[in-house]
Image: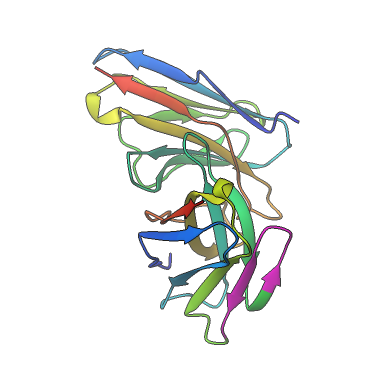
Amino acid sequence: LAKTTQPISMDSYEGQEVNITCSHNNIATNDYITWYQQFPSQGPRFIIQGYKTKVTNEVASLFIPADRKSSTLSLPRVSLSDTAVYYCLVGVRNTGGFKTIFGAGTRLFVKA
Amino acid sequence: NAGVTQTPKFRVLKTGQSMTLLCAQDMNHEYMYWYRQDPGMGLRLIHYSVGEGTTAKGEVPDGYNVSRLKKQNFLLGLESAAPSQTSVYFCASSSKSSSSEAFFGQGTRLTVV
């Protein structure tokens, strides 16, 4: 399972765009990149997943360069309610279940 | 939609006591998982199941047992609780077709004194 490295914490202000970068130098050919969000006292929640280039949904965008050794989660115009821990995960998508390793994540704090 | 439901939400145990945590999902998912999360840390996989009647060990299985007698339920047992098992326990499930999109329960906060 590929190991990921992401910043421990980030601060932002309401209305700003936030970019959280994750590095995964040992990503394998079959690995997908998945991001989860976790609020205090809640279980993690799936945000977005991608394999290469760019993926966008109603919550976030995910940018993956051609070498796939890193990825960037982009949250547009954050609000106070986006204060949470964000986890970058790398693993095979459909084989053997969700046994991906969770690191400590990035703690995002959005200020007014 | 209920999604993934964990029972109980809170529990305090004395060292040496046993208990069972129940996880139920109503999404007809094949895969189910138990994680634990300690303060300031990410989640660690305890056990998982890829189908009814099957279970497998994760990263930190020692001191825990699991059973999946029905597809919708996944039970986590502590036979003899220890203070080191004080943690928040999360159950999750995912489908076979998109296993990396997991749905998590609200967690069970367990304290062993």
B1 displayed left or right of A99: right
Q: How is the image coloured?
A: rainbow
Q: Which residues are magenta?
A: A55-65
Residue occupying the point 51% across, 51% down: A112
| Vertical relation: A66 (above or below) A72 | below
- Residue B108, percent across and down? 46, 26
Residue A94 visible in the shown view = no
Residue A77 figure quarter: bottom right
Residue at 34%, 42% in the rendered image: B60
Q: Can I make out residue B59 in this image?
A: yes
Nearer to me, B56 or B8:
B8
**How many numbered circles are shown?**
0
Q: Residue at x 71, y 55 (%)?
A: B97
Where is A77 relative to A66, above or below?
A: above
Which image quarter: residue A107?
bottom left
A1 or A89: which is nearer to us? A89
Indicate the position of residue A54 as horizontal and vertical percent values: 67, 76
Q: State yes or no: residue A99 in magenta.
A: no
**Image position of A46 with respect to B88: above or below:** below
Residue A61 falls within the magenta-colored stretch? yes
Q: Where's residue B5, x and y in %?
A: 61, 27
The quadrant in which the N terminus of chain A is found is bottom left
Give the image quarter of residue A57. bottom right
